[in-house]
Image (cartoon, rainbow, N blue to C red):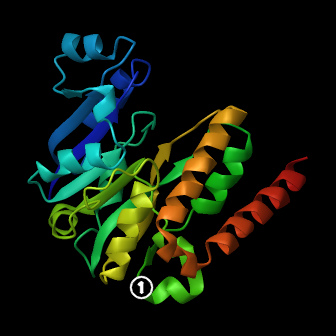
């Protein structure tokens, strides 16, 4: 199937060349287009794009939205599969994309996401372990009673969705979502009786060394998302957070 890749860029000079090269080296897939959307930046990202003759579109800072920027690009694509990535993922495997997309269209599976690993030995290490196991699996509406909120876990740091399904469900419903746009989409997919695959063999290195304020801001935005989408409360959002906290504490004690 033909694949359209969508990747927002902002101050991406330290990532861009390696990222683009890693996309070019992918095997056993048919990449129809790579769509870089550059938000006005303060570094040399645009110069690098021009110097290397890499196609891109440019938007103003005021126009960027985690959901709408992706949605606008996706609606213009006409391949079979949309792949969303972020600029800061590091892809080392030439079969990353094949492993991510290989099951889409089979047995009701219309979306998939990759395993994420971090290089830092900090709290992110434990959250990655909790959210990204080494075993692949598929989730559907039948898993809600057992998994609760985790049924809708999804990450567009490296994810794929069938183009026709994304468009049929109207993407992110033209909403300006500052965070968790991936979970918003996953919820719609599951509740419309589609299946999502977690592909543990599709691996990206995705690391952050957040400062305390950055962590606070992310959790604040996450809280706002759940407040504005309170229909998710029925799936025990507090319980999911508590499970993560317990796992982090357990692993931290094991490592010290």
Q: Could you tell me residue 156's position as x and y percent? A: 39, 52
Q: Could you tell me residue 3's position as x and y percent? A: 18, 51
> Which residue sits at x=89%, y=54%?
253
Q: Residue 9's quadrant in the figure?
A: top left
Residue position for label 1: 141
> Which residue sits at x=40%, y=72%?
187
Q: Residue 211's quadrant in the figure?
A: top right
Q: Nearer the viewer, residue 123 or 180?
A: 180
> Which residue sits at x=39%, y=34%?
87
Q: Is residue 8 above or below residue 28?
A: above
Q: Secondary structure at mark 1?
A: helix
Q: Could you tell me residue 4's position as x and y percent? A: 18, 48
Left or right: residue 146 compared with residue 112: right
- Residue that extends furthest to the front in the rendered view of this protein: 228
- Residue that extends furthest to the left in the rendered view of this protein: 78
Q: Is residue 99 above or below residue 217?
A: below
């Amino acid at each position: 199937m033909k694949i359209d890749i969508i990747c927002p860029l902002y101050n991406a000079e330290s990532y861009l060349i390696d990222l683009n090269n890693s996309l070019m080296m992918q095997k056993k897939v048919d990449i129809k287009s790579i769509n870089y959307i550059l938000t006005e930046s303060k570094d040399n990202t645009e110069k690098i794009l021009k110097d290397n003759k890499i196609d891109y579109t440019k938007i103003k800072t005021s126009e960027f939205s985690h959901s709408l920027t992706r949605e606008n690009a996706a609606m213009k694509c006409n391949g079979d599969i949309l792949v969303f990535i972020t600029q800061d993922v590091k892809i080392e495997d030439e079969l990353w994309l094949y492993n991510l997309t290989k099951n889409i269209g089979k047995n009701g599976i219309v979306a998939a996401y990759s395993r994420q690993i971090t290089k830092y030995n900090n709290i992110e290490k434990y959250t990655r372990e909790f959210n990204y196991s080494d075993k692949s699996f598929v989730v559907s509406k039948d898993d809600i009673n057992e998994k609760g909120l985790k049924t809708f876990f999804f990450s567009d740091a490296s994810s794929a969705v069938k183009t026709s399904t994304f468009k049929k469900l109207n993407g992110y419903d033209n909403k300006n979502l500052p965070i968790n746009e991936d979970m918003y989409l996953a919820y719609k997919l599951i509740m419309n009786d589609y299946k999502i695959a977690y592909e543990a063999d599709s691996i990206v290195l995705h690391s952050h060394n957040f400062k305390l304020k950055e962590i606070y801001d992310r959790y604040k935005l996450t809280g706002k998302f759940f407040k504005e989408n309170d229909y998710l409360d029925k799936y025990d959002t507090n319980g999911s957070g508590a499970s993560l906290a317990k796992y982090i504490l357990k692993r931290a004690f094991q490592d010290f």
